[in-house]
Image (cartoon, helix red, strand yellow):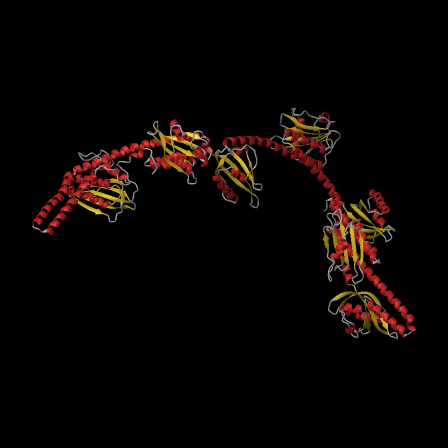
Amino acid sequence: MLTDPGDVRALRTALRDLVALSTIPAAWVGREPSTIAAGLADVLVRSLQLDFAFVRLCDPNGGAAVDVTRGDTWKAFPEWLERHRPPVGQSWRKEIIPDVGGGVERCRGLVIPIGVNADGGLVAVACDRTDFPTETDQLLLSVAANHAATAFQSARLIHERLRAEAALREARDTLALKVTEGTGELRRITAELQAILDASPIGIVLFRRDQTVQRCNPAFERLVGWTADDIVGRRVPLGEDIEKRWTPFVAQLDRGEGFSGLEIRIRRKDGSEFDAALAGAPLADEQGRPAGFVANIEDISDRKRAEEALRRSETYLAEAQRLSHTGSWARDIATGELTHSSEENFRLFGFDPQSARPSTDEFRRRVHPEDRGRVRDIVDKAARERMDYEVDYRVVLPDGTVKCIHVVGHPVFGASGELVQYVGTAMDVTERMRAEEERQAHLWFLESMDRVNRAIQGTNDLEQMMSDVLEAMLSIFECDRSWLVYPCDPEAASWNVPMEHARPEFPGAFVLGHDLPVDPEIAKAFETVRASSSPVQFGRMSEHPLPSGAEERFRIQSMIAMAIHPKGDRPYMLGLHQCSYPRAWTPREERLFQEVGRRLEDALTSLFMFRTLGESERRLEEAQRISHVGYWERDLATNHYTWSDENYRIFGLRPQERLLSFDEVQELLHPADRQMRAAAVAEALRGGPRYDVEYRVVRPNGEVRFVRSVGDVVRDESGRPRRVFGTVQDITERKRGEHRRMAQHAVTQILAEAATLEEATPRILRAVCECLVWDVGALWRTDREGGVLRYVEVWHKESIEVREFEAAIRDSTFKPGIGLPGRVWSSREPAYIPDVVHDANFPRAPIAAREMLHAAFGFPILLGGEVLGVMEFFSHDIRQPDRDMLDMMATIGSQIGQFIDRKQAEEALHRAQAELAHVTRVATLGEMTASIAHEVNQPLAAVVNNATACLHWLAAQNLEEARQSAEFVIADSHRAGEIIGRIRALIKKAPSRKDRVDVNETILEVIALARSEVQSNGVSLRTRLGDELPLILGDRIQLQQVILNLMINAIEAMNEVDDAPRELLISSARGDSQSVLVSVRDSGPGLNPDSLDRLFHAFHTTKPHGMGMGLAISRSIVEAHGGRLWAAANVPHGAVFQFTLPIGAETVAGPNVRDPSAGSLPTRPK
């Protein structure tokens, strides 16, 4: 249904023009081609309101074209027409010209060919309308052009036929008069007749009675494609259609009857067919007998196509009228009767289209009586002024149905300019009128709601919003008073009016904000309103009476009210008073009132929520400030961030200073963290894990803060990311605490693992830098004699280069109070510098500036009250002092001092243990004096014997025997030297020496030393040494002491055994894949199980004269080598002592004398 007035007017105009054009062909019947062309041009310019029109009508038979032009807007049209003339064999095409030029206003042109095959000419028009040409314009122009082509063609045909008929009549008359004048005149007439026949566009052929061709003119030859030579004397095959009709044609002609106007299909020589109009006349011989007939054949294919196009147009028009409920009509001015009325026009007025056409008076009687006079006046005035007219009126159908009709009339003038008739349309606009009423009601509703919405949205102040809404309602409903009551609660003790608006003549009924008691009448009104789901009307024109006394007290005659329930508050009652007259509100007004109430309910809820939200936001802002948590949101379309105030504060910016883009936020990050954050954001946008990243922020003042940012991606229905939102928390204090704990733990672990401070120093510098995120660390030691601090160690991250600053550290010394190290030395307290570049007491400041080093701190290494050294650290960032970190570093300085003190005590203990081990070895060797002397005497006795033999052989001059005796002397001397060397090695006090040791070789060396002791005690010694044992890393002398101590203990234990063999077995084997196992088994009395736990304790002994240190020292030696020593019972009797030694151990410790520097600060790095 069309509701837009513009669309309705456009359709109305198009239909009017279409109807006007459809009636024009009747006015062109019998007119000259020039009149038809001029009429078409005039209709186009006047009816279609065009600025330019050109009409060309072409004769399809080759005659001269007729051109007519109206208007001069398209000044360059002749040149355009010449440029766009179609090539030979082609036709004009439809074309739209955006601007024809030549005028102030822009004109658009349209060229439309005429005829089905575009061979009837063309119509060219121009108009300055911006929407020209619409589809309707093009359709109307096509219809007008086709009508003109049809009329032109018909006029041509009629003219040619009349001319031919006149010529034939003239020829016949002339022939009758001249027959008697002689044969010569007959030949001349015959020649003239032949010329006429030859020139005729209609095919003329003479047939004999047997249908053979006697003669034909050239037009016939052209029509059928046969030449006269081919067909004269023969029957021409002209197709099935004419063959079927030959017999009745011939019978009719034999009766002397001619025929005309027959339409048939004729086949050409090439097999194609065309529509033809056939006329025939009989021929008789001299006796008057039928001799044949003459036939006229006219090609009417173009006319048939035009008629078909016209029929289609008429069908389309009828269907369009039916669908649009639009009828067309034509009324003759002279008679006042309708000369044309379409079927739809009949139906509009309630007439049957199939019945007889009603008169004009019958049509007039269907017009509503109240509208007849007005319609008559409008029609008569239009006729007097010869103008178009439009009129709306009602039609009353026989069944009482009333329709609204819109009629448009258009005058048609004759050739001499007289008003001939009116043509026009009648349209049923009942639904449109009804829709218009509904539209006006809906528009009033929307405009009213828009006014209320503007009042609601115009302010966030609750009281002002109430006032604006009530003022708008007063105007919208044209009532006398609008108000709000609170609370609408029959159980409440009181009620008041928070807001009211009234017209001046009916002042306010209430005192705003004044509490009034809830009496029974008011309570009943509250109950009534709350019980209803729609507005409730009170007063004489409704079922609910006004509260008693209200009519007189407040001058109320009618009231409408409803309860509204904003969330978060008690109900309100919204109402209107009509004081000037009793009023019943219409359903439309009730609906609007209810919608306003609902909208006000939502607005009150929103404002209450807005107030609550504002309070919540203030609390949230305070919570964010306290917890250092900010909120952010990034719009991916604009790439800008929205930040909370705390977010700005975390980044060191003024709140709401400006909107930042992604790249601008990146610039606020520490350079080392930018790529990491960008990668995390990109991964989250690609659908990866949730955005959760920690990074550093560099504030405008250079301060570095640690933050943690967590966010989620919001996507649209297609899965594309639209925005990212989340929180950012300042975790600087937490990170600093973590870093401090990590640093303290790392330093504590290093001090627990390191053997010397020289080993621990670079590790401590690195651990502090990495854990606390600093870049450079240095250690200075106190030179008491020189009174300065000297460089010991420097460390920096591999990712930075500080060559000049590192060289300055190596080459510098500091006196007390000078520079950062000197300041710490003299104060014995940690010191912090936020930016050394601007520190007056920092000699290395220029170098630090070039190396971009800023923050620095240092702390002393204290032992008691003495400063042993100073550690200092540097960062590329500007950092504010951290008291907790300095306190922790002071503790670390004390830990390092305690480490030095502990290492000095350990070294003293190690020296005492080494001294004790040496004494034990000497004591053991002292107990073996006799055996050692025996071992030494054996090679010495052999030396004496062999020397005596050598002298004897020399005296006998037996040199070979003397040489052998001398070699024996040498060998025995070497053996005695080796024994003495082993003894000296065991007795000698020397520091531990780490070597690759063959365990089997060490066992054999100890056995050789104690062989005499074994033999003198009647002990049977056996060995079971493993093959291809791996070497171990250890001290050979200490391991010999362990094996020797275990052998002596076993020998002494077996002294008490007299009734059984004394057997000693020493074995070696692989303990496991990582150790070698050595066992010493004896057959002595065994071990007391109760004393096994104390067996290796110092000063515990089972021998009468023992010190109780041998096994304790042996276990400490084995454990210092990373092994284990234990004892167990031997089966069937005796004891077994076993120990393991790890393969390839990298360190050897134990009771030995250490480097004296292990417990103090090193002087230079190795």
**Left or right: 236 in relation to 974:** right
Residue 625 % position (x, y):
52, 31
380, above or below 534, in the image: below
Residue 188 % position (x, y):
87, 72
Please indicate, yes or no, whether residue 190 appears anywhere in the rendered image. Answer: yes
Please indicate, yes or no, whether residue 532 appears anywhere in the rendered image. Answer: no
Residue 778 % position (x, y):
39, 35
Residue closest to the eye, 431 or 1068 = 1068
Residue closest to the eye, 1135 or 760 = 760
Q: Quadrant of residue 113?
A: bottom right
**Left or right: 244 in relation to 1139:** right
Q: Quadrant of residue 213?
A: bottom right
Q: Quadrant of residue 781?
A: top left
Quadrant (top left, top right, bottom left, bottom right) of the C terminus: top left
Please identify the residue farthest to the left as the structure is shown: 956
**Left or right: 882 in relation to 228:** left
**Left or right: 988 in relation to 402:** left
Residue closest to the eye, 1085 or 65 = 65
Q: How many marks?
A: 0
Residue 1012 % position (x, y):
15, 42
